[in-house]
Image (spheres, rainbow, N blue to C red):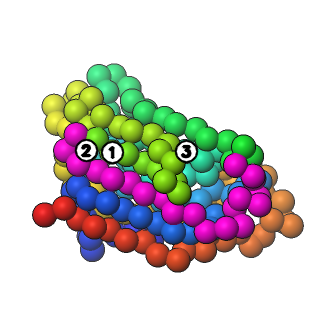
Amino acid sequence: MITRGKFQFKYGRVTLRAKIDVRKGSWPAFWMLGANRANGGWPACGEVDIMEFYRGNLLANACWQGTDKTVWDEAKWPVAAWGGEKWAEQFHEWELVWDENSMVISVDGKVLNTIDVAAAKNERRGNLPFREDFFLLLNVALGQGGEEVPDAHMPMRMVVDYVRVYQRQ
């Protein structure tokens, strides 16, 4: 699902309630990209990974264009520490709370990462990408960067109960 050209927003609360597949080769994600991609492309537009499972870890990341490279504000949480595949059999709720000062990413009420919006200055454009409109993406990729996907792990699924956006007025 990609909401580009259909729905974009700035500030508010975004929630996803879903079950994700955490077996080898699964790469589910719920993320956002800056809607103003025409003026510098990625990473200048900004990216926020509200939920990404990659190689055994839940990621809660943000990235933007720095002076001479992509800057990442990364947080990794091993799913094995939460119960691994047993944990993934249940529905969980991911949330992003976003305002002009910060972005707080959590799962089931546990804060995974807090991003300082003012620190994420795009040095090439001179703007703060996390103070602009974003659109949502929801996908399941396979292979985790070229990793072999065992046939027994197919099909892979992300079961979504809901996606909700509460935009601040």
Which of the image's four quarters has the N terminus?
bottom left
Q: Measure the C-alpha gap from mark 3 to mark 2.
A: 18 Å
Q: Residue furthest right?
A: 152
Residue 127 image position (x, y, % from top left): 16, 36
Bin the neighbour count of mark 1 within 10 Å (Cα to Cα): few under 14, some 14-19, many 20 and up. Answer: many
Tell me where the magenta segment starts and ends, as one range: 82-101
Residue at (86%, 67%) from the top-left corner?
152
Q: Nearer the viewer, residue 69 or 158?
A: 158
Residue 91 image position (x, y, % from top left): 61, 68
Residue at (42%, 71%) from the top-left corner?
163
Q: Measure the C-alpha gap from mark 2 to mark 1.
A: 9 Å
Which of the image's four quarters has the C terminus?
bottom left
CB under 8 Å between discs 2 and 1: yes
Q: Nearer the viewer, residue 94 or 22?
A: 94
Residue at (43%, 57%) from the top-left corner?
95
Bin the neighbour count of mark 3 within 10 Å (Cα to Cα): few under 14, some 14-19, many 20 and up. Answer: many
Task: Give the residue at mark 1.
Answer: 103
Q: Is residue 21 visible?
A: no
Question: How many numbered dots are placed on residues in this image?
Answer: 3
Amino acid, disc 1: Met
The mark nearer the N terminus, 2 or 1, is 1
Task: Give the residue at mark 2.
Answer: 130
Between disc 2 and disc 1, the foreground one is 1
Q: Which picture quadrant has residue 71? A: top left
Amino acid, disc 3: Leu
Name the secondary structure under disc 1.
strand
Amino acid, disc 2: Phe
Relative to 111, is 32 above or below?
below
Task: Give the residue at mark 3.
Answer: 59
CB under 8 Å between discs 3 and 2: no
The mark nearer the N terminus, 3 or 2, is 3
